């Protein structure tokens, strides 16, 4: 049975109309990504470990996709400035963010008002790396293990003086969690920088410190790292769990995007970054920064964000840590 020319024209027009609908155009957009440079907003200052790690990943993505991934530093307000900017950006894959536990989790617990909510306003993409904190002491105090420090704290009526690099820092929170789990009285001493913590640890002015970076092991006694496992680049330092306390406190770096990022673009970025982090080049680059390359799925990153929020909320409330001026 032959169709009339008008009938054939009708079906051609119908197919054209359905072919031009929104779902097809969205698929085309996703398929063509990235067709122009991608901005990676970096919340860390130039030259720091977070900045260097961001630039290493950006170069890997540039090599993978043949399109420029450009790191833009937007520090300020403890990460609030850059996070707010990205939260309001279009979810088209052309604006990403490298963030950390502070801006992504702690800000919402430490400040009365933050103009974004990580779980609502961002799409998790991938965990880049972890920086476990380290509890250190002075060689002159004679503590060889974390158990020695705990035993002294329990026998000393005044407890322990533990230094950290600022109110609300991971060093502060780690020290508070450690003291609570160990059942020791502690006074938390704030310093202006991690280096200042180490200086007073070496001088014996404080019993211990959590400087939120891995200091030179030869200058201090590193009692324990706070991650799930020993560090690849400092394998002789035991974990707190190995020392008998259920404490895991990790500073991490991750890539997020504005909420609503298409799954296809999210998964492309995730796969490319995972490949880089598993490569010898990626692992060596991160090890030089004292960062443990992690990777994983977007779902795992989302779980980490949720878990850390639940872990630190009661500690912050118990210690009454509040960073608002009021």
Image (spheres, rainbow, N blue to C red):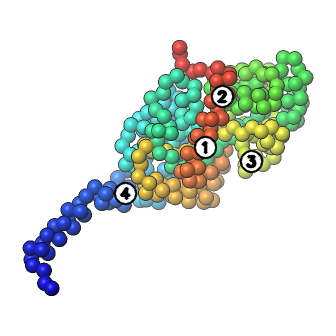
Q: CA distance from mark 3 to mark 2?
A: 24 Å
Q: Which residue is mark 2?
A: 314
The dot on residue 294 is none
Q: Which residue is mark 1?
A: 304
Mark 1 or mark 3: name the one nearer the start of the chain.
3
- Which marked residue is nearer to the observer: mark 1 or mark 3? 1
The dot on residue 229 is 3
Residue 29: quadrant of the picture: bottom left
Q: CA distance from mark 4 to mark 2?
A: 41 Å
Mark 3 or mark 4: name the one nearer the start of the chain.
4
SS class, disc 4: helix
Q: CA distance from mark 1 to mark 2?
A: 17 Å
Mark 3 or mark 2: name the one nearer the start of the chain.
3
Q: CA distance from mark 4 to mark 1?
A: 27 Å
CB contact under 8 Å: marks 4 and 2: no
Is 108 placed left or right of 33 in the picture? Answer: right
> Farthest bottom residue?
1
Mark 4 or mark 2: name the one nearer the start of the chain.
4
Q: Which residue is mark 4?
A: 30
Residue 123 screen position, x and y as percent: 47, 45
Residue 32 screen position, x and y as percent: 35, 59
Residue 300 screen position, x and y as percent: 59, 49
Q: Residue at x 84, y 17 (%)?
A: 158
- Which marked residue is nearer to the observer: mark 4 or mark 1? 1
Mark 1 or mark 2: name the one nearer the start of the chain.
1
Is 164 placed left or right of 2 in the picture? Answer: right
**Which of these two is toward me, 97 or 246?**
246
Q: Decide if residue 60 is in sight here.
A: no
**Which of these two is toward me, 59 or 143?**
143
Count of numbered badges drawn on the protein = 4
């Amino acid at each position: 049975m032959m169709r009339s020319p008008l009938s054939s024209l009708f079906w051609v027009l119908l197919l054209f109309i359905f072919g031009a609908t929104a779902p097809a155009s969205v698929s085309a957009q996703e398929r063509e990504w990235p067709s122009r440079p991608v901005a990676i907003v970096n919340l860390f200052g130039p030259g720091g470990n977070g900045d260097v790690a961001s630039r290493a990943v950006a170069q890997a993505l540039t090599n993978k996709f043949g399109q420029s991934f450009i790191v833009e530093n937007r520090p300020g307000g403890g990460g609030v400035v850059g996070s707010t900017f990205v939260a309001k950006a279009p979810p088209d894959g052309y604006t990403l963010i490298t963030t950390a536990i502070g801006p992504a989790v702690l800000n919402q617990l430490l400040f009365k008002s933050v103009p974004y909510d990580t779980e609502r306003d961002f799409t998790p993409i991938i965990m880049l790396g972890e920086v476990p904190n380290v509890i250190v002491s002075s060689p002159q105090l004679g503590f060889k293990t974390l158990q020695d420090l705990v035993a002294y704290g329990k026998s000393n009526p005044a407890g322990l003086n533990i230094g950290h690099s600022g109110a609300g820092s991971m060093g502060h929170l780690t020290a508070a969690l450690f003291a609570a789990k160990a059942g020791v009285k502690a006074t938390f001493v704030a310093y202006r920088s991690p280096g200042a913590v180490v200086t007073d640890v070496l001088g014996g002015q404080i019993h211990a410190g959590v400087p939120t970076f891995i200091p030179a092991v030869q200058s201090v006694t590193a009692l324990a790292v706070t991650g799930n496992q020993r560090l690849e680049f400092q394998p002789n330092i035991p974990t707190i769990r190995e020392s008998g306390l259920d404490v895991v406190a990790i500073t991490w770096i991750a890539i997020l995007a504005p909420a609503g990022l298409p799954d296809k673009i999210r998964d492309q970025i995730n796969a490319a970054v995972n490949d880089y982090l598993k490569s010898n080049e990626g692992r060596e680059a991160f090890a030089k920064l004292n960062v443990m390359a992690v990777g994983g799925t977007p779902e795992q990153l989302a779980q980490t964000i949720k878990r850390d929020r639940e872990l630190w909320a009661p500690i912050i409330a118990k210690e009454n840590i509040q960073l608002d001026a009021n």
